[in-house]
Image: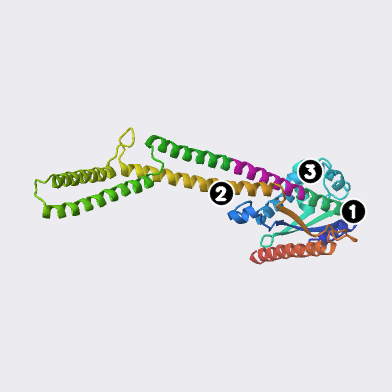
Amino acid sequence: MVVGLPVMMTTAYLVVFAKDQYASKVGFTIRQEETSTASELMGGLSSILGASAQGHADLLFEFVQSQEIVEQIMDEFDLVANYSANWPLDPIFSLWPTATIEDVVWFWGRMVRVTFDRSSGMMLVQVRAHDPETAQMLAQLIVRKSEEMINRLNATARIDAMRNAEADLEAALARLRAAREALAEFRARTQIVDPQADIQARMGVMSNFQQQLAETLVEYDLLSQTADANDPRVRQLARRIDAIRNRIRDERQNFTQLDVTIDDTDYPRLIAQFESLQVDQAFAEATYQAALTAMDSARSNASRQNLFLANFIQPTRAERAQYPQTTLLIGLSFFFSLMAWSVMALVYYSLRDRG
């Protein structure tokens, strides 16, 4: 009774009531475009633009088993009517007619088996139905809905990339304008185009004064050897030497403190301000150039599709019913019934021996 009755009931149900199920198989994976545009190669952006195909394969794996794809397929095909056609004669392998969307999703998980290899990104989907045509059609619908989902991902990625690239370009342009305006305001305020060039000009003046001083000193020494100290030429050369030395002293003082601005900013701080503004402008120009490259790359990517659904197994059409697996289910029923009988027998004899 414990072993034979469950096996007989299982056999009778599978042979008499259970309806045949046909399986259609389809295999696909997500491929990402491997070619790079000229702007990406120039800017080195090919490795950072867009998400990896592996991450999208994970999304596709969840999508095939989600309520969303069930609702989309139900808009084109009546899953409840198809899977409840044998209700209540076959309640185990059929869906009840009053099933809610949650019930349909649960039954979808029984009829659609998904195998996913994360290392390669390959996905195998097996769809079961009571006739081979329906199974193949559902497999084709899964492929089409998956392609539509990938296209939505592409469209969303393109929109996000364009929006982010435009925002970055606007920010970089505003930064470049601010840097150039600050440098122009500095030049207008100080009346100096380039402090470095101004220093070189002043160094030229200093060199000229020193050369004149050297020549005047030599002339003074030569004249002192032959003329009296009260000679007007000697006194004139002495005054010339003093005047040149005063000019040299004044010029040297201007290098450390020079009234070139309204707030009497000294020359070292003036040079520091100019160099800081130049660094800001150079960085703003580099940022703007990178933003332009990213914008070109985003615009190029927006005109093409980066992700593709590659079918390496087209939806198959079964010629014989593979499910339910009658022999396997009867064998499992016999095995578990035998295990239950063995446990009960062991418990019974153990209690009897103790009594």
Q: State whether the magenta stretch is mostly helix, strand or loop.
A: helix
Query: Mark 1 or mark 2: which comes first in sequence?
Result: 1
Q: Nearer the viewer, residue 42 or 139?
A: 42
Residue 117, image x and y in percent? 69, 61
- Place residue 316 in its image quadrant: bottom right
Kindly identify which residue carries mark 1.
Answer: 133
Q: Is residue 131 visible to us here?
A: no
Q: Where are the magenta residues, as a range?
A: 147-166
Question: Residue at position x 83%, y 52% from top?
Answer: 140
**Crowd around label 2: few <14 · some 14–19 · many ≥20 (10 Å):** some
Q: Nearer the viewer, residue 353 or 237?
A: 237
Question: Does residue 240 appear to the left or right of 342 in the view shown?
Answer: left
**Crowd around label 1: few <14 · some 14–19 · many ≥20 (10 Å):** some
Q: Secondary structure at mark 2?
A: helix
Marks counted in the figure total 3
Q: Secondary structure at mark 3?
A: helix
Residue 112, image x and y in percent? 78, 53
Residue 290 image label: 2
Circles 1, 2 touching at the beta carbon (< 8 Å): no
Image depth: mark 1 or mark 2 in front: 2
Marks 1/3: CA–CA distance: 19 Å
Please check the rendered image and state whether residue 150 is part of the magenta-colored stretch, yes or no.
yes
Question: Does residue 90 appear to the left or right of 182 in the view shown?
Answer: right
Question: Residue at position x 51%, y 41% from top?
Answer: 176
